[in-house]
Amino acid sequence: MQHEALRLVRVFHDLNQSELAQRLDISKSYLSELENGKKAPTLELLQRYADTFGMPLSSFLFFSENLENPSRSERARAAIAGKALKMLQWIADKDEVT
């Protein structure tokens, strides 16, 4: 879920992977792996995302997942995060149309 949030924030800000990779000081291939969920971002990298986009770090941590034996509150948080991602995707899709 977090990887999709990272991708949607980039898309919302109208940046391609090369531009964001340069701003984050990482390779484009590493950014692609992050956005595809093949690699997990470090806390340091999430802080760079937060700084780059002027967002609180907690916004990115909200989408992190605890898949092994999630508590009731964790399942609720994950459900809310999923809804937030759908809303971000809707915004990104609407932005592409205009």
Image (cartoon, rainbow, N blue to C red):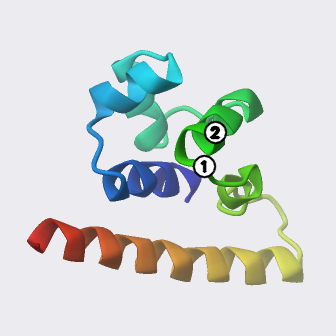
Whole-angstrom CA distance, mark 1 to mark 2, is 5 Å
Split into 4 quadrants, where in the image is the C terminus? bottom left
Q: Is residue 4 left or right of residue 97?
A: right
The residue located at (49%, 72%) in the rendering is: 85
User: Residue 12 appears at what percent x and percent y?
Assistant: 35, 59
Residue closer to the observer: 18 or 5: 18
Q: Position of residue 64 (x, y in %)?
A: 69, 55
Measuring 71% from the left and 63% from the top, which residue is drawn there?
62
For residue 97, what is the image quadrant?
Answer: bottom left
Q: What secondary structure is found at the residue carrying circle 2?
A: helix
Left or right: residue 58 versus residue 33 is: right
Residue appearing at x 68%, y 74% in the figure: 78
Quadrant of the drawing holding the N terminus: bottom right
Quadrant in which residue 82 is drawn? bottom right
- Pointer 2 residue: 51
Residue at left offset 65%, top offset 82%: 80
Image coords of residue 37 (percent x, y): 49, 43
**In this figure, what is the number of numbered marks?**
2
| Three-letter code, disc 2 | Asp
Q: Is residue 12 above or below residue 90?
A: above
Residue positioned most to the front: 54
Q: Is residue 15 above or below residue 20?
A: below
**Does 96 appear above or below 47?**
below
Residue at the farthest left position: 97
Q: Are marks 1 and 2 in contact (CB under 8 Å)?
A: yes
* Label 2: few (<14), some (14–19) or many (≥20) C-alpha neighbours in 10 Å: few
The residue that label 1 is drawn on is 54
Q: Is residue 21 above or below residue 95?
A: above
Rendering coords of residue 39 (x, y %) = 55, 32
